Amino acid sequence: MKSLSKTALIFGISGQDGSWLAKLLLEKGYTVHGTSRDREASGFSNLTRLDLKERVRLHSTVLNDFRSVVQVIRDVQPAEIYNLAGQSSVGLSFQQPVETLDSVIHGTVNILEAIRFLGLGARFYNASSSECFGNTAVPANETHPFHPRSPYGVGKAAAYWAVANYRESYDLFACSGILFNHESPLRPARYVTQKIIRGAADIAEGKADRLTLGNLSIARDWGWAPEYVDAMWRMLNHATPEDFVIATGRPHRLEEFVALAFEHFGLDWRHHVVVDDALLRPSDISLSVGDPEKAKRLLGWEAETAMPGVVARLLDAEHRARQGFAS
Ligand code: NDP
């Protein structure tokens, strides 16, 4: 029989977290398999940027197609399965609510069902999100109530409860990481953090003269993505399957993020940033901050990089990319 040890399957390996997790698992000696909706069409630019593309085995898998999910899990026989796939933009989820809910909820349930159906002892990590909580008047821990404020958050909350239900009903080793925002240069430009970094750099280089943004008063708990994928691995290698909040515990307003990025180039953001009401969301979260105490206590995990370090690292990576260096 094929050994189950040290083989991992990452659904959504082309994304930011999927690529950083592949790097971490390869460094730990795992054989890493990963999925994309269409292996032939995906550019895998993140894997290429990290010089990993030839070191992982890639599969075409559509998460909301049960046959497709069963087949890849049966073929790979992974010891650990990470679900990092699905429509992940909060803003886009207001425009594509059904696609978002479908990919997040059905995708997660299909993996849970496939694990049961195949009778695998695989451990399962599901990418949940701080968006489940909505506004957090106090730092949210694992018992904080859910009140999502976007279709994305609604989908993540449903998937979270599906994981909890399968764990309790069928004794699966299944857990959710409730991760707060985490950034890296692998984020696409659609996300506000990259939009700000690239926008400030373009203005400094004279390629643009203004940057258009939405609500600057929101506050988020921003961490560094490579550290957050380590927390995912620790959850699956903990003795018992449990859910964990992963965060820095420190909120910062988006305006601070913008000011730091522009200051780096000797610019005053107020001369270059235009707030456009068209970019405001139908409902938004004004304050999002997590309490990572449980992760520190049980997993020995703690965020090392918080603001302003996140901004500094993003600026450094952007500078290197513009000079033609890898991450
Ligand atoms: P990305 O968007 O970078 O990656 C997600 C991957 O899912 C994509 O590369 C894509 O792969 C696939 N995907 C995209 N849209 C769909 C869709 N409609 N249906 C099915 N698959 C799709 O996300 P991240 O790596 O940043 O995040 C990983 C997971 O963690 C996501 O579930 C995200 O929601 C969650 N999360 C992320 C946080 C963050 O701050 N980054 C915070 C909390 C949770 P392909 O095109 O190759 O199929």
Image: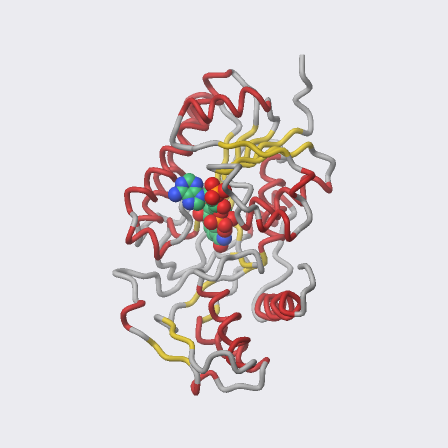
- Furthest residue in direction top, as rendered: 1
Q: Nearer the viewer, residue 182 or 266?
A: 266
The structure residue drawn at horizontal position 70% and vertical position 34%, both measured from the top left corner, is 30
Residue 194: x and y in percent read 50, 65
Q: Is residue 5 left or right of residue 83?
A: right
Residue 208: x and y in percent read 47, 79
Q: Is residue 259 left or right of residue 312?
A: left
Residue 33: x and y in percent read 61, 33
The structure residue drawn at horizontal position 35% and vertical position 59%, both measured from the top left corner, is 135
Quarter in which the C terminus is drawn:
bottom right
The structure residue drawn at horizontal position 65% and vertical position 22%, both measured from the top left corner, is 4
Residue 310, above or below 263: above
Q: Nearer the viewer, residue 203 or 263?
A: 203
Residue 50: x and y in percent read 66, 51
The structure residue drawn at horizontal position 43% and vertical position 33%, both measured from the top left corner, is 62
Residue 64, above or below 152: above
